[in-house]
């Protein structure tokens, strides 16, 4: 009988079995200690109420299963001398991951004060979910972590993102009962159709079914085994089952399943790498069924706890007040036989450490989980080779994202050998005019191909799946482990990942405050097919609110850029691709757009973030009569067209034109690193002159950003106000009162004394708007003076 065919009970030698069980018991003991104890870590004396934390926080229910997984990952890592990381989907099982990090020594290596002895154990216990300590989740403070798991659904896509372009890496991923029910997790099972066994690592999902979520049974745990197997096989996986509540039996079954999984992974990779096999095989998945709260109190106050939803968080909730609970807690802790696990000094005994890997092989010490240790600067080319010539502003047009596509093609080509740059998007790379990248690489695809298919490539580095959640998860995992990428998305539908970007921003903000966490490449969004040019899709595709969402977040992390033309987009893209530890949102059009600035002018303008376009205004004195401001490509066009109307009709009016490319510049300097001091802001916008501001998104955002400024009362902002349809490009701005005629009328209305002097001009502008409405309904196109407009 081969090893793989042995019954689980006989799979391990007695020595192996006892060592694995000792490690698991030690991890369970440390987990319970973190939840409950603030003193007496080794139970040197009977437990007293003062040894117990005043506030009991944490999650016990999932922790024994996580400890089991960590214990057995240690074994396969050490036995096979392999590099591995683990993504802990049930991130609320933080005490388990902390316990294992402490046992393997990576925690003490990272935090020397928390030594691997009784004194360090006491600190480990006290700091957990304690003021001034560490969170209850697997947070950035946890060595070896890249995934908090506070919001469920993203573990598997993160794991696949880690595996991309990491051919020697095994990425284990624990998926809990609750997470398995989320939409993002359901979509991410399809990631195996994009995993290249030649250039990528392997992902080993471990579906941990302990039967319950917070208060309800879980769907997958209640499915008949055959139905669950059919589901997993249909998703492209080959299930291996581990089930039971007898620890020794489960250890044998888990060891066998892990060895079988590693053997199958090795066979798939060997076939692809050495024998040229292109068939997509089913990758292994482990289905682990153990009781919720395994080895904890069976009953509390006459109610079943172990194996039920009551074990989810803190099984014994009144330990300080209830002597019976205190007694049960002590019995629970002593059931792990801590004297067998730790010596008199609180140091783990040799048997506990038998299967812990060495050095960087430890899960808590992998450089892959501190991606800044591995990240390299991208080989960015000079922008001169991609910039469009601008002899005169506003006379020639280019598609900004198509111009950017040429730059991204070169970056793809230059990283072909290093394979540390990818482009992610939901089926929209060509739609967003970035198809030039296909000259450097194709779209990742492991399924069969047909003759009609284009640009599919088993080794491609463009990732397209019609799931924004999965794209975001892949990219986050890729960035957190030291690589670079761009997420290209339709502006309206990037909202699908609102919650995901929240979590990533929180991670970055926290990581920035942890000295040992090194900066990683920024998460770069390219939002295009934007609100103002959804001519064919209409109202359902018109929503510029992602900017508002992001600018609510940590100022030290978030950046928003609205480049008005192709050259400014190149400059912004060059900047964000070189940046670290930010979430950069770049909004740019894919439709033909006027070229306003030369490359050198674009560099200076983007460096300022906001500035006066002297050539567009008519001011000659110390201060203008009015400021026409804009942010975004279409608002810029309408402001410049309005400025030309005013130049023609009211030549004596002193007009200043201000363009904003970095939206955070509008914030006060004390609120955002890019913000302007009041004096600088007043010099740009004036303190007392009317400002008519044409903005890409919802107009109230500009008011919110500038409400503290001296001249805020003089700001009048036009933007998107939920008026949309399938209509002409110019009708979209008319519907939202962002058009050039309305902006010119706003100037007449707001410059003191001008309304009386320019009444006939205002009437003429209003009449053109009326003529516009009639024209588009008759001809289906915009007015000739709009469609054929140039700056001249």
Image: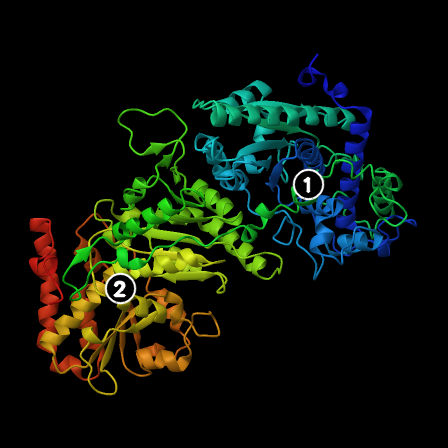
Residue 312 got which mark?
1
Q: How crowded is mark 1: few (under 14 residues within 10 Å), some or many (20 or more)?
A: many
Disc 1 is placed on an element classified as loop
Residue 33 got which mark?
none
Instruction: State which tag comes first along the sequence, 1 or 2.
Output: 1
Residue under the image location 55 percent in, 46 percent down: 151
Q: Which residue lies furthest to the right in this view?
A: 45
Q: Can residue 72 be seen in this view?
A: yes
Q: Looking at the picture, how far across and down is residue 382, in whole percent?
A: 32, 58
**Residue 93 or 270: which is nearer the viewer?**
270
Horizontally, residue 625 falls left or right of residue 51, namely: left
Horizontally, residue 121 falls left or right of residue 705, namely: right
Q: Residues within 10 Å of mark 2 (few under 14, many from 20)?
A: many
Residue 599 got which mark?
2
Q: Which part of the image, by quadrant, shows the C terminus?
A: bottom left
Q: Looking at the picture, how far across and down is residue 157, in whole percent?
A: 50, 39
């Amino acid at each position: 009988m081969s090893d793989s065919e042995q019954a689980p009970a006989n799979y391990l030698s007695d020595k192996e079995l006892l060592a694995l069980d000792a490690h698991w018991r030690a991890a369970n003991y440390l987990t319970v200690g973190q939840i409950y104890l603030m003193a007496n870590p080794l139970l040197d004396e009977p437990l007293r109420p003062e040894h117990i934390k005043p506030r009991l926080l944490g999650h016990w229910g999932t922790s024994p299963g996580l400890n089991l997984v960590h214990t057995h990952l240690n074994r396969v890592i050490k036995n096979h001398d392999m590099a591995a990381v683990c993504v802990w989907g049930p991130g609320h099982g933080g005490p388990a991951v902390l316990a294992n990090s402490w046992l393997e020594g990576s925690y003490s290596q990272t935090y020397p004060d928390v030594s691997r002895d009784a004194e360090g154990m006491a600190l480990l216990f006290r700091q957990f979910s304690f003021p001034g300590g560490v969170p209850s989740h697997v947070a950035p403070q946890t060595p070896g972590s890249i995934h908090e798991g506070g919001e469920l659904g993203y573990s598997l896509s993160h794991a696949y993102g880690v595996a991309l372009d990491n051919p020697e890496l095994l990425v284990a991923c624990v998926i809990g009962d609750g997470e398995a029910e989320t939409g993002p997790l359901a979509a991410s099972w399809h990631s195996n159709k994009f995993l290249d066994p030649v250039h990528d690592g392997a992902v080993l999902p471990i579906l941990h079914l302990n039967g319950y979520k917070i208060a309800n049974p879980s769907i997958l745990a209640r499915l008949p085994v055959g139905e669950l197997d059919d589901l997993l096989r249909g998703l492209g996986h080959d299930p291996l089952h581990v089930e039971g509540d007898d620890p020794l039996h489960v250890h044998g079954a888990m060891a066998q399943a892990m060895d079988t999984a590693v053997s199958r992974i090795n066979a798939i990779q060997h076939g692809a790498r050495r024998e040229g096999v292109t068939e997509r095989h089913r990758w292994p998945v482990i289905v682990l069924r153990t009781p919720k709260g395994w080895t904890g109190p069976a009953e509390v106050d006459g109610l079943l706890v172990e194996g039920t939803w009551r074990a989810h968080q803190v099984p014994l909730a009144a330990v300080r007040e209830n002597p019976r609970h205190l007694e049960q807690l002590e019995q629970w802790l002593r059931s792990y036989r801590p004297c067998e696990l730790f010596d008199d000094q609180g140091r783990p005994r040799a048997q506990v450490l038998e299967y812990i890997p060495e050095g960087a092989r430890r899960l808590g010490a992998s450089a892959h989980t501190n991606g800044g240790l591995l990240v390299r600067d991208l080989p960015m080319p000079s922008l001169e080779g991609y910039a469009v010539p601008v002899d005169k502003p506003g006379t020639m047009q280019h598609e900004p994202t198509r111009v950017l596509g040429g730059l991204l093609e070169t970056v793809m080509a230059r990283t072909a050998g290093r394979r540390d740059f990818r482009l992610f998007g939901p089926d929209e790379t060509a739609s967003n005019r970035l198809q030039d990248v296909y000259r450097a690489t194709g779209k990742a695809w492991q399924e069969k191909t047909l003759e009609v298919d284009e640009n599919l490539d088993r080794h491609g580095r463009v990732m397209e799946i019609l799931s924004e959640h999965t794209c975001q998860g892949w990219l986050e995992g890729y960035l957190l482990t030291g690589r670079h990428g761009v997420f290209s998305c339709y502006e309206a539908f990037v909202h699908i990942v609102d919650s995901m970007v929240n979590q990533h921003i929180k991670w970055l903000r926290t990581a920035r405050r942890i000295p040992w966490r090194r900066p990683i490449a920024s998460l770069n969004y390219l939002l295009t097919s934007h609100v103002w040019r959804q001519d064919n899709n209409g109202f359902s595709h018109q929503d510029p609110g992602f900017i508002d969402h992001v600018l609510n977040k940590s100022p030290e992390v978030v950046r928003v850029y609205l480049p008005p033309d192709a050259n400014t987009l190149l400059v912004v893209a060059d900047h964000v691709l070189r940046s670290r530890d930010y979430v950069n949102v770049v909004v740019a059009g894919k439709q033909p757009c006027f070229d306003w600035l030369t490359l050198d002018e674009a560099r200076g303008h983007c460096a300022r973030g906001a500035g006066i376009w002297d050539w567009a205004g008519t001011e000659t004195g110390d201060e203008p009569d009015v400021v026409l401001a804009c942010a975004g490509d279409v608002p810029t066009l309408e402001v410049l067209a309005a400025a030309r109307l005013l130049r023609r009709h009211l030549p004596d009016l002193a007009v200043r034109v201000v363009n904003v490319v970095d939206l955070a510049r509008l914030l006060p300097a004390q609120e955002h690193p890019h913000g302007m001091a009041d004096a600088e802001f007043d010099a740009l916008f004036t303190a007392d002159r009317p400002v008519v501001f044409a903005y890409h998104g919802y107009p109230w955002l500009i008011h919110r950003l500038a409400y503290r400024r001296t001249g805020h009362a003089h700001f009048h902002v036009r933007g998107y106000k939920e008026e949309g349809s399938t209509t002409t490009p110019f009708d979209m701005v008319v519907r939202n009162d962002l058009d050039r005629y309305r902006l010119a009328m706003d100037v007449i209305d707001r410059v003191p004394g001008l309304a009386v002097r320019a009444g006939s001009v205002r009437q003429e502008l209003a009449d053109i708007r009326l003529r516009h409405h009639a024209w588009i309904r008759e001809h289906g196109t915009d007015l000739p003076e709009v469609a054929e407009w140039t700056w001249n």
